Amino acid sequence: MYSRYLSGEKKKDDETVDSLGPLEKGQVKNESLRELRVELSKKHKAKDLDGFGLYLYGVVLRKLDLFKEALDVFVEATHCLPLHWGAWLELCNLITNKDMLKSLTLPDTWVKEFFLAHMYTELQMIEEALQKYQSLIEAGFSKSTYIISQIAVAYHNIRDIDKALSMFNELRKQDPYRIENMDTFSNLLYVRSMKPELSYLAHNLCDIDKYRVETCCVIGNYYSLRSQHEKAALYFQRALKLNPRCLGAWTLMGHEYMEMKNTSAAIQAYRHAIEVNKRDYRAWYGLGQTYEILKMPFYCLYYYRRAHQLRPNDSRMLVALGECYEKLNQLAEAKKCYWRAYSVGDVERMALVKLAKLHEQLNESDQATQCYIIYIQDVFSCGEILEHLELSTAFRYLGQYYFKSKRYNEAFICAQRCCDYNDVSTAGAYWGSDFTRVRLVLKAVKWRGQSARRLLGNLLERRFPNSDPPDR
């Protein structure tokens, strides 16, 4: 029966590649599935299936989208043959939330601990996953490369890039010929723009086995980092020919189509990623971005909400939601999203600025001022000030606010800090280029003369008008 199932899958994949291409995978069906279901159902009722038979029955049910029945069969398979990891992984693909996981009656075996750790990682319960892996290490699995790789993946999922890179480098030292999870490693190298390391990894994996899905994904990431997006998409398509259910390849191909401005193909790729795994927040987030480009805010809001449900503490999802609510003129909801994004740890340090501009738009001066002050404090306290282009915007607004409040010392300091930035605004033309006069006035203000104050006032009114700055 398993041979018949594999034969049907092979025919389906051949038809997919030859006639439709990878993006139309969902239109081709395995014609033997219904026959297999009837036969396996009879054997199941007669209690004539062992652990492997139950596994096959569950796979057939899942392929036919009978998820509830498939879930029950996979649970039964884990009881019948607890050491069959494939059944546990299939069960993992059907669990969508913590409540569903708690409701399952699973066999009390050491394999269950590995399953729970894996499941916690998939459900973004990273602290619980790391604790579970640590307990497994202490129980005698300290040299397990699988556990090291899963810990690295867990750190990758919470965007702790330094720790994830450290774990993957340790993994490479212990098992230099390992290919599993190297696509995730390449994602980290891509994010850090580590071209030499990514190039070395791609060549190394190509020498080991160039026909592995992970190898194709690594090479695709390498070409993407070099801005050769057509070649990158080609390698992700090759990965999908090898394994049409490769979640990472679908998502990454969607990213490449986005880079090539092919939004329709990107939407298809992201939707296929969701078909493979509905818990992939990257695909939901990618769909939100594509519909944002297409100026369809209601669709955009739906997909960003789904991404936020999967990653409730990811500031990027919250900022994206806030921007959607702004476009839909639901400003109260937008403010909540921006503040929540700041509260959970703003990765891009833009939530407070967006919140401040929203308060500014609503003439809520005190709230806008507080947001800008906190933003400036956060930027300067982080130790390394990179290209925070909104600092000049913050100082501009604070200078205007303090001057209107007759707090001339603070206004003077803010205006002086504005001179530290070449672009003293969000657009160069907005401020002009005559900084010499600004410095002369600032020098005059130190004498606290009334004429100097009036001159500063005129300057601030000219340089800090009430109108909003132009869009970036």
Image (cartoon, rainbow, N blue to C red):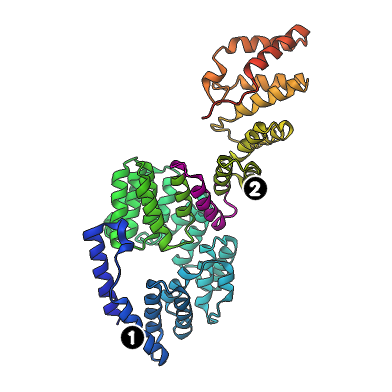
Residue at 66% across / 13% down in the picture?
459
- Quick one: SS at disc 2? helix
- Quick one: SS at disc 1? helix
Q: How many labels does the image show?
A: 2
Q: Are marks 1 and 2 in contact (CB under 8 Å)?
A: no
Residue 60 in the image: state x and y as whole percent.
Answer: 37, 76
Residue at 28% across / 74% down in the picture?
31
Mark-to-mark CA distance, 1 and 2: 53 Å
Under mark 1, the amino acid is Glu
Mark 2 or mark 1, which is nearer the start of the sequence? 1
Question: Is residue 301 toward the left or the right of residue 191 in the image?
Answer: right
- Residue 248 visible: yes
Predominant SS of the magenta segment: helix
Residue 64 drawn above or below residue 267: below
Residue 307 in the image: state x and y as whole percent.
Answer: 52, 54
- For the view shown, which residue lies furthest in the top direction? 451
Residue at 66% across / 43% down in the picture?
332
Mark sitting on residue 39:
1
Please identify the quarter of the rendering in which residue 350 is found. top right
Label 2 sits on residue: 340
Residue 404 drawn above or below residue 31: above
Residue 222 in the image: state x and y as whole percent.
Answer: 34, 46
- For the view shown, which residue lies furthest in the left direction? 18
Crowding near the residue tagged with mark 1, few <14, some 14–19, many ≥20 C-alpha atoms within 10 Å: few
Q: Which residues lie in the magenta part? A: 292-316
Under mark 2, the amino acid is Arg
